[in-house]
Amino acid sequence: MLELKHISQEFGGLRALDEVNLIVNEGQIYGLIGPNGAGKTTLFNIITGIYQPTEGGVYFQGQKIDGNPPHQVARMGIGRTFQNIRLFAKLSVLDNVRVGSHAVTQAGLFGSILGLPVVRREEKQILHKSQTLLEMVGLQDKRWEYAENLSYGEQRRLEIARALALQPTLLLLDEPAAGMNATEKQELMSLIYYIQKEMKLTILLVEHDMNLVMSICERIAVLDYGRKIADGSPEQIKNDERVIQSYLGAPA
Amino acid sequence: MDAFLMQYIDPYYLRILVLIGINIILALGLNITTGVTGQLSMGHAGFMSLGAYTSAILSLQFAAPFWAALLCGALVAAFFGFLIGIPTLRLEGDYLAMVTIGFAEIVRVFFLNFEPGGKAVGLSGIPQNTTFGIVLLLVIIVIFFNARLLKSRLGRSMYAIRENEIAAEACGVNITRIKVLAFTIGAFLGGLGGALYAHYMFFIRPQDFAFMQSIELLNMVILGGMGSIPGTILGAIILTIAPELLRIVAEYRLLFYGALLVLLMIFRPNGLLGDVRIYDLRKRWMNKEVGA
Ligand SMILES: Nc1ncnc2c1ncn2[C@@H]1O[C@H](COP(=O)(O)OP(=O)(O)OP(=O)(O)O)[C@@H](O)[C@H]1O
Ligand SMILES: [Mg+2]
């Protein structure tokens, strides 16, 4: 469903990604790991159109998508969360999710200010859908709070709800568990499982928590200094010499 | 209606009420561009000027009906808002502010040299068609549509752009389009306010729409609370009345403004009514769910 072919990315003289190939199949939960600065976030930014790769191409459902601006990539059904949380801080939790449905709704200027029935109906659907999503991530009670008033873990879950409002077929999660405590991580894992099954999603996730990655990912790719040094099942990755050397450290 | 009111209200107060109404319309326009969408515009008076001159020339030279003059004034301003919206979108913060200042300055210099606009002398004898009744009606309509817009899908995407452009794009918001839209609507209301102003003041000159006027309007939005309709209205009311009250101590007017801004930054950094949004508040109260 998602295929990266020979992706390279240079920032000035720095080669942040070097000839990366990656194939994510429909319905997979795919893990992307690697030490700090390996280029994981850069890869996400390339997939979502924030960066145009220096070389190589991004293919989504058979179609070349690199070169499209981020809002169009989103409209194709690729949702994402951010490592450094990017919520709409001074909007309510509910409005954050409502903005998430922007791409899959239509209301225009005149319909909105005239309050046409179509627009009202759409607003009701947006509200309903947003509340269902908030229920799912356990934030329904906080829907009138400003997003900035949520705890760290809650903010991460809100980002997921907002990304889901886009009705994506591919969801990119950049370190969704960062800053969460053990219980929150546990809940997050079941949430990711749940949304993947329930919404028939394909998920690509970056995470440093090995426990989490190994237990929920079907397949894992490892980046190191911009190069993909391995990919395979969690078992294969755990036993890969190069991965252990450069990232996992001494085997546990 | 005005004649009727005049029996009860001193014309001086009626005049202040009319000016408050016009300023509310102007400030609500700027609020959409700057307060809601976060695009700092320091040239709102330029749109006001375009609306004022367009409508005044239509009234004086073509004897256009008042409503047509108002509408054309607003549309011409909106068109220029659309035009300057496009190149400015790639700019941010300070750069955008400079371009908008430059734009208003160009408009001012243009009218200084524009024969049909009376050059530096300006235009006089503009029919005084702007009445309290008409201003009141338009204020109500503008507030109503404004509220509808801000709670709609497009309004939310404007707030989203102010809060975080990258996240807004990731939600599928075409930020270029929405910013141009915000600029255009803001300019439309600027032009409408300018047209009402011209048909109330009897005469207009290019310097009526100089830099200080843009700053006054910006102050209303900042004082009341960026992005908040009730806040912007409150800001417009306070800053229309304040100079009148301070007339006696005219020399200290700027001092007063300075002190006001300092106090504001200390006590209410988000403006008097912060981000109070009518529909949010009502829901919060109805649901008794106001957070801690
Ligand atoms: N916009 C940019 N301009 C210049 N250099 C950049 C830019 N974005 C990323 N880099 C560099 O590219 C490299 C890869 O960064 P990236 O953020 O993708 O790493 P990461 O794998 O996500 O790391 P982390 O685990 O710390 O999040 C780093 O050396 C970083 O400094
Ligand atoms: Mg990263």
Image (cartoon, coloured by chain):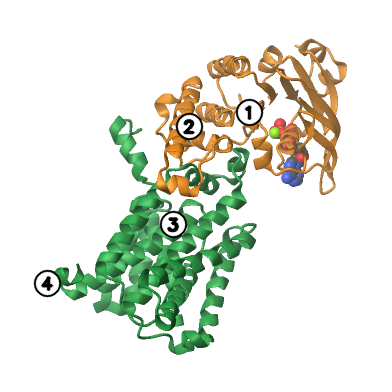
- Cβ atoms at labels 4 and 2 below 8 Å apart: no
Labels 4 and 3 share a subunit = yes
Q: Which residue is drawn at 66% across and 16% down?
A: A212
User: Which residue type does callout 2 highlight?
Assistant: Ile
Give the amino acid at mark 3. Asn
Q: What residue is disc 2 on?
A: A126
> Which of the 4 image quadrants contains residue A234?
top right
**B59 and B135: which one is in front?**
B59
For marks 4 and 3, the one nearer the N-term is 4
Percent of width and height locating residue B81: 54, 64
Task: Quickly name the residue at label 4.
Answer: B7
Q: Measure the C-alpha gap from mark 2 to mark 1.
A: 15 Å
Residue A1 in the image, given as x and y percentages of width and height = 76, 24
Distance Cα–Cα, label 4 vs label 3: 35 Å
Kindly state the secondary structure of the residue where label 2 is placed. helix
**To which chain does the residue with label 1 belong?**
A
- Measure the alpha-carbon separation of dots 3 and 2: 26 Å
Q: Is mark 4 within 8 Å of ligand 1?
A: no
What colour is chain A? Answer: orange
Instruction: Find residue B31 and name its label.
Output: 3
Regarding residue B83, the answer to whether it shows in the image is yes
